[in-house]
Image: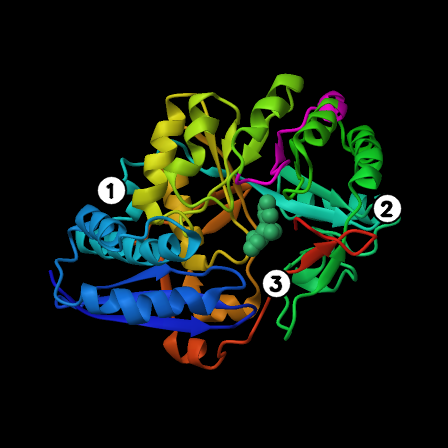
Amino acid sequence: MRITAADVIVSSPDRNFVTLQITTDEGITGLGDGTLNGRELAVASYLQDHVVPLLIGRDAHRIEDAWQFLYRSAYWRRGPVTMTAIAAVDVALWDIKAKAAGMPLYQLLGGASRDGIMAYGHASGRDLEELFDSIRHHQEAGFRSIRVQTSVPGIDAVYGVPSQPGAGEKRYDYEPAQRTALPVEEDWDTAAYLRHIPSVFEAVRSEFGAEVPLLHDGHHRMTPIQAARLGKSLEPYDLFWLEDCTPAENQEALRLVRQHTTTPLAIGEVFNSVWDYQTLIREQLIDYVRSSVTHTGGISGLRKILDFAAQYQVKSGLHGPTDISPVGMAASLHLDLAIHNFGIQEYMHHGSLTNEVFRQSLTFEDGLLHPGEQPGLGVEIDLAAAAAHPYQPAYLPFNRLRDGTVHDW
Ligand code: EZ4
Ligand code: CO
């Protein structure tokens, strides 16, 4: 089965998405997600200008060969743009192979290891009242596990908390990328944050009880000793995980955090290869791998990381914000269902315009996700709907401290 065409589709229904559609001479098409939030056109160009010419005429069944060829022949290894472009090709080829086999993709990955995929949702609020309301709202929507983010007294705009909760489906969803000409500035003060957060978890535990799994995202802002202190101070509240407590590029930083706290640690949404995890996994410095299929070279890339992690009792907690397209989310769900070392899956509902562009087969019942039983990924794209929503410039926010210094966001 030969590849006859590969089309890069950039569309902005509720936000920007880059999608690769590969077509074969047998008429089977496959979709891959190539969305890199805030840098979408870099991946679109990488695919269009450098990868598509290499795909035409290749055997669509040779997925591992395509992966190794794109990784090694580029010479310039790794990096988010390259690994996201490789992911788009890899996932589209898995979609094609599974459609050709007449099976949902998870069957080709070894079959289901569980009945459904435990998902966590994002609760947030500017104060406790709003936060409790958001937690209840998520529980009513079926989420059994909840990420908790709140405002911090003295900080005006903070990661994870909408400054103005809206109506309907977007009520509590914090969408960091803004379709504006320049990045939005948020504020940060680590000392104020460290003083405030333990009291929030104390209040949440006393309101919602001991059993509900609670998660928190530190979003790369602390030094190792600050992160160690936060992990220790949150131990009484039994977190499922503390995510991205230090900037992710320094693996050694997690050693110090680990020596001081039993709060489980998760990291890796900005990682793109197994080498970003080498020390973290081998020394068992983390508990959960936070990568997405979309940013780690696809199913072939992420499966290598998760198999390595499994040998050290490190589990999956795949990244699932709305900037992973429905195509990337479906790929994650097929992998979640098949692997043995599954932990949890992040899940935010996509907006209604996105669901018009991408027809999804996933289900969410009783807190459990399932990718569905359609052959392939189970996602189809409506090209006319995609074309009706052209690309719009968008940026992620950034942080400044009180004195104006740029800080990690
Ligand atoms: O900031 O997806 O855990 N989830 C997150 C996300 C990320 C965005 C970046 O594109 O940290 O909100
Ligand atoms: Co995160």
- Residue at the spot of label 3: 177
* Label drawn at residue 260: none
The answer to which of 385 and 260 lies nearer the viewer is 260
Q: Residues within 10 Å of mark 2 (few under 14, many from 20)?
A: few
Q: CA distance from mark 3 to mark 1?
A: 35 Å
Residue at 40%, 64% in the rendered image: 43
Residue at 76%, 24% in the rendered image: 233
Q: Secondary structure at mark 2?
A: helix
User: In the rendered view, would you say 400 is above or below 289?
Assistant: below
Q: Is residue 371 visible?
A: no
Q: Residues within 10 Å of mark 3 (few under 14, many from 20)?
A: some
Whether residue 240 is in magenta: the answer is yes
| Mark 3 within 8 Å of ligand 1, using the beta carbon | yes
Q: Which residues are magenta?
A: 233-249
- Residue at the spot of label 2: 129
User: Quick one: quadrant of the N terminus?
Assistant: bottom left
- Residue at the spot of label 1: 108
> In the image, what residue type sits under mark 1?
Leu
